[in-house]
Amino acid sequence: MSEDEFKNLVETLYDRRNELEEGRITIDSVRESLIELGLSDLLGESDIEEVYQQVSREFRRRQWKNYFNFAMILIILVFPLAAFSGYQLRQYVVANFPQLVGLNETPDSLKLLELEGQVERLTANQTKLENKLKNSQTEKDKLNNRIQELEVENKQLKNLTNTSTSTTVTSLSTETTSTSAKFFQEQGIVYELKGCQKSNVGSSSQTINCTLLITSKQENVSLSLYSKPYFSDPYSRMFEAGKEYIGTRVKLGSYSGTNLANNSLIKDVPMEGTIIFDNVPLQVNKIEGLEISSLLRSSYYNSGIKVEFRNISLSEK
């Protein structure tokens, strides 16, 4: 059987597939088709069996090809519809239920602007709080200085209301101080003036350094030595020929400052302190009165102390 004859046989059987039982090829249907095509005399029974096998394979191949083509047509027709339906469904969900797909109604750009605004507001609040903290610290310092001033005033008022015996003792102490002009003791603290010296002598002004030894006789204490005033702090000063000169710098041990110097005193161990007066006129050659202010902090006394020395001569440094 030639190839063309075999193709004619397959086409004949394929056209008659609806007449076949369940659409399947049988050997009888092959014989009938061979008789119809006039080919039955050319083949024996064994040849017909072989042709039956070949025709069955070809028939199954065509059926699978048809199934595949049908499936492709369905995919081509259905996929765009499914994709479009899915897109429409997603648009509906996004519009009505954004939380289901993890979206927010606010666009990213608007959300970013909102976050930037929050950051700016937080930064402004932080700046305001820092300024309030600085102002609070300044007010605290002013209050502390005012407290010290009130403590000094309170001590002075107490001294004024002391008994006559206390007044007599105080007067004797003051007289002794004026006479010696080198030694003063108050609240267990000894102030011993070593002297005052000229330095930095220029064409119109000079610097005067007044040095003293300070000793605690009762216990270890903390002491502040003052020069010029700061807010309501006390200060040290000197007098000559009716003129008042305010201290400009101060030293106490290894500490120094323009307003005050703090240090700790060990019992019975002297510490050197210096009050410095800058820009003093050259005509000042002696000191009629020297007032030194300090603040004592101890277990038995926490207030200010003022020391007065008189008639002090100046030496060259």
Image: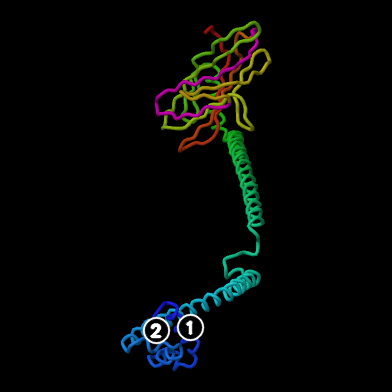
Residue 88, position as x, y percentages in the image = 64, 72
Numbered tag placed on residue 11 in the rendering? 1
Q: Secondary structure at mark 2?
A: helix
User: Which stretch is magenta?
Assistant: 259-283
The residue beneath circle 2 is 56
Q: Is residue 74 above or below residue 48?
A: above
Query: Is the magenta region chiefly helix, strand or loop?
Result: strand
Q: Residue at x 67, y 12 (%)?
A: 241
Could you tell me the amino acid type at mark 1?
Answer: Glu
Residue 134, position as x, y percentages in the image = 61, 41
Which of discs 1 and 2 lies nearer the camera? The answer is: 1
- Which corner quadrant of the image does residue 267 belong to? top left
Q: Which class describes the residues within 10 Å of circle 2: few (<14), some (14-19), or many (20+)? A: some
The residue most toward the right is: 242
**Residue 3 painted magenta:** no
Q: Residue at x 58, y 19 (%)?
A: 290
Question: Residues under labels 1 and 2: Cα distance?
Answer: 12 Å
**Residue 264 painted magenta:** yes
Q: Residue at x 41, y 87 (%)?
A: 39
Numbered tag placed on residue 54 in the rendering? none
Q: Residue at x 37, y 86 (%)?
A: 42
Residue 218, position as x, y percentages in the image = 42, 31
Q: Secondary structure at mark 1?
A: helix
The quadrant in which the N terminus is found is bottom left
